[in-house]
């Protein structure tokens, strides 16, 4: 069944007051809904103008190695689970030590196996895509200890706090009573910022074209404040990652008998930021009247829709 193309007003749920946006032609700009770049997380001022002020900055940890697991398997970052499995099976047969007793392919075989083990696991793949190879490897350690790979990001394992999870974007999705009773599919196009994976050293790769600077990142640094005294300080630094804007169509399936105010969640589809797990895009079903009026906290608003 082909879904109707929505041309309507959307309301951002939560916050001091509702905001309504028209996206008849351009799609939903998530950055606008979140109040600026990453909801205030990118750009802007930072404390201390570089934070020196009498402090001596100590050498920081070396930059993490850039490992492209998709390249190891010869697939694209958008590869499906089936494509990942197929690529691994083909390479593992070619590189298996039993077929290469001289050991010449052992290192490559281990690299391909690690790539598959990470990308075939949904949670570890998310950690890799948005936190890098180090995050994915630490996630494996959490799993071996009986925890979730996300514990290191969200504090479950005594690691980082919830700040490493991006904000959700909540959007009112107008539906008719017929949609709720009979079921339907509705689609909407969102505009969001994404992180260009593994593009720092490969600007000429086709998927990296059009990528530019990402917003500044928060970083904890160690500084010497005096003899025998070392302090931690949070500063805003230029990001070494690359970002770009993209449009993506999200198709919401409205099941028969769904109640109004039901939420349909698209995991990790919100604005992206380096080193941060993206938030979700959440569609909240909002009943409309016969002539397209949306009833909400701010009163009645008009929406239009067209079916294809």
Image (spheres, helix red, strand yellow):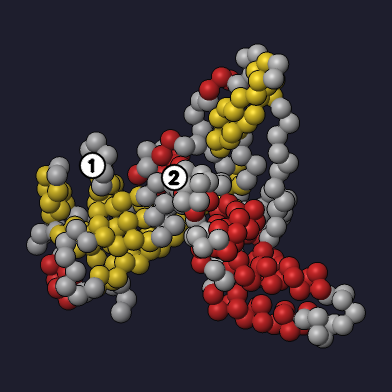
Left/right placement of residue 80 relative to residue 108 reads left
| Residue 302 point in image, percent of width and height | 16, 52
Q: Locate residue 27: give its quadrant.
A: bottom left
User: In this view of the protein, which residue sits in the foreground, 74 or 190?
Assistant: 74
Q: Which mark is residue 18?
A: 1
Residue plotted at (53% across, 22% down): 47
Image quarter hosting the C terminus = bottom left
Residue plotted at (34% across, 61% down): 265
Disc 1 element? loop
| Residue 20 point in image, percent of width and height | 25, 45
Q: Is residue 280 visible?
A: yes
Q: Which mark is residue 7?
A: none
Q: Name the front one of labels 2 and 1.
A: 2
Asked if labels 1 and 2 touch by Cβ distance under 8 angstroms, the answer is no
The furthest residue to the right: 102
Disc 2 element? helix
Residue plotted at (71% across, 43% down): 63
The furthest residue to the left: 290
Provide the residue designation for mark 2: 162
Cα separation, mark 2 vs mark 1, equals: 25 Å
The 10 Å Cα crowd at callout 2, few under 14, some 14 to 19, many 20 or more, is: some
Left/right placement of residue 212 relative to residue 31 reads right
Q: Is residue 185 above or below residue 45?
A: below
User: In this view of the protein, which residue sits in the foreground, 215 or 2?
Assistant: 215
């Amino acid at each position: 069944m082909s879904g109707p193309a929505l041309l309507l007003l959307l309301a951002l749920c939560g916050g001091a007051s509702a905001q309504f946006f028209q996206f008849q032609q351009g799609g939903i700009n998530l950055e606008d809904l979140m109040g600026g770049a990453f909801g205030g997380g990118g750009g802007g001022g930072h404390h201390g103008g570089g934070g020196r002020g009498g402090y001596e900055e100590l050498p920081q940890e070396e930059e993490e190695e850039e490992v492209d697991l998709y390249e190891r398997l010869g697939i694209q970052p958008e590869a499906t689970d089936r494509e990942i499995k197929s690529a691994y099976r083909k390479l593992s047969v070619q590189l298996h030590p039993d077929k290469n007793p001289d050991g010449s392919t052992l290192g490559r075989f281990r690299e391909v196996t690690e790539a598959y083990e990470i990308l075939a696991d949904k949670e570890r793949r998310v950690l890799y895509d948005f936190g890098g190879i180090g995050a994915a490897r630490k996630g494996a350690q959490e799993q071996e200890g009986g925890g979730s790979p996300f514990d290191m990001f969200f504090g479950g394992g005594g690691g980082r706090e919830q700040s490493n999870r991006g904000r959700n974007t909540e959007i009112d999705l107008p539906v008719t009573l017929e949609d709720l009773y009979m079921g339907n599919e509705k689609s909407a196009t969102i505009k969001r910022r994404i992180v260009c994976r593994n593009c720092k050293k490969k600007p000429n790769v086709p998927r990296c074209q059009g990528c530019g600077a990402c917003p500044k990142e928060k970083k904890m640094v160690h500084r010497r404040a005096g003899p025998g005294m070392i302090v931690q300080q949070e500063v805003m630094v230029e990001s070494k990652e690359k970002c770009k804007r993209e449009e993506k169509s999200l198709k919401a399936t409205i099941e028969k008998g769904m109640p109004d105010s039901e939420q349909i969640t698209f995991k990790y589809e919100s604005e992206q930021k380096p080193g941060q797990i993206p938030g979700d895009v959440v569609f909240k079903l909002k009943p409309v009247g016969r002539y397209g009026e949306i009833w909400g906290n701010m009163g009645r608003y008009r929406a239009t829709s067209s079916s294809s």
